[in-house]
Image (cartoon, helix red, strand yellow):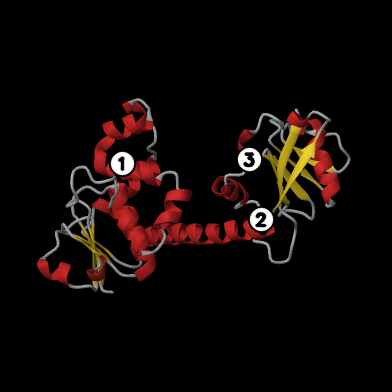
Amino acid sequence: MKAILTHPGSAHKDDLLACCLLVARHQVPVWRREPEASDLDDPGIVVVDVGGEHEPARSNFDHHQFPRDHEPICALSLVLQDMGLYEDAKSFCEWLEPAEWFDTRGPFQTAEWLGVDRAVMNRLNSPVDITLLRRFAQKNEWNPGDPIWEMMRMIGEDLIMYLRTLRERIDYVAQHAELHEVEVSQDKARTLRVLFMPRSETMPDDPSSGLARYVSVSGEKVDGLIYPDRRGSGYGLSRHEDSPHLDFTQISEEADVHFAHARGFVAKTSATELERLLELVAQARV
């Protein structure tokens, strides 16, 4: 691979992020100019968000030639598809679909689709967005060693790692997690559903990171999560999606609970036996 080529002028989130992924993948310079026919014909030059072609076999990833009523999809989407990461990105990156809408439909239709006022869209920007896009647009070529190129490489590497490791974590949770029901009283309506991740030698470095995503993907109805504390030998207890049925301040005085957040959404305990962990959850029932 020789280079990545994208359009000159102002930069947008979709072409910048598409280039970030490609920089991480190929470690080559980024050119910002209009493509020539020879660029489009050369599979060694990745043409992104310009050129009027979507031909992955020739390394061309543009979406502007799609029909007006085509589903919202941008250059970033096409690159993610080519890398086999698109479906996971749609599932795990909540910002991706709004980015597709914004790039293909503009701010007004995107705001309408999101069900928010147009003014809200500007509130989503920060110096991180503004400076990276502005600086990226200031030069026609970025090479390894340039600060912006190196930042793009790191963004691309982190996004690829996030998607690949999260899928691995979700698969791990699916194989090892246990679903338990905690009955607080004889009233069945007060039953709590808790997902428990036992400690093991093969668990990921941060065993809690894939739990919430697994619950979302699996469709399970869960009130709380119990998972190994990565800072100690005990376990963490948390309520899932801010469940109104759990308040861990209610167990703050227990001898084996060394931390309970003042807002009640998480606690840490030195307890390791499942029976005791479920008992603490039952005591936290609101």
| Residue 114 percent coordinates (x, y) | 37, 32
Q: How many marks?
A: 3
**Residue for point 79% across, 55% down:** 233
- In the rendered view, does 10 fall on the left or right side of 270? left
| Lower position in the chain sequence, tag 1 or tag 3 | 1
| Lower position in the chain sequence, tag 1 or tag 2 | 1
Please name the residue that numbered disc 3 is placed on.
221
| Residue 277 percent coordinates (x, y) | 81, 45
Closer to the camera: disc 1 or disc 3?
Answer: 3
Spatial separation of the CA atoms under disc 1 and disc 3: 30 Å
How many residues crowd around disc 3 within 10 Å: few (fewer than 14), some, or many (20 or more)? few
Spatial separation of the CA atoms under disc 1 and disc 2: 33 Å
Please name the residue that numbered disc 2 is placed on.
207
Q: Look at label 3 and name its amino acid.
A: Lys
Please name the residue that numbered disc 1 is placed on.
101
SS of the residue at dot 2? loop
**Residue for point 85% across, 47% down:** 275
Image quadrant occupied by the C terminus:
top right
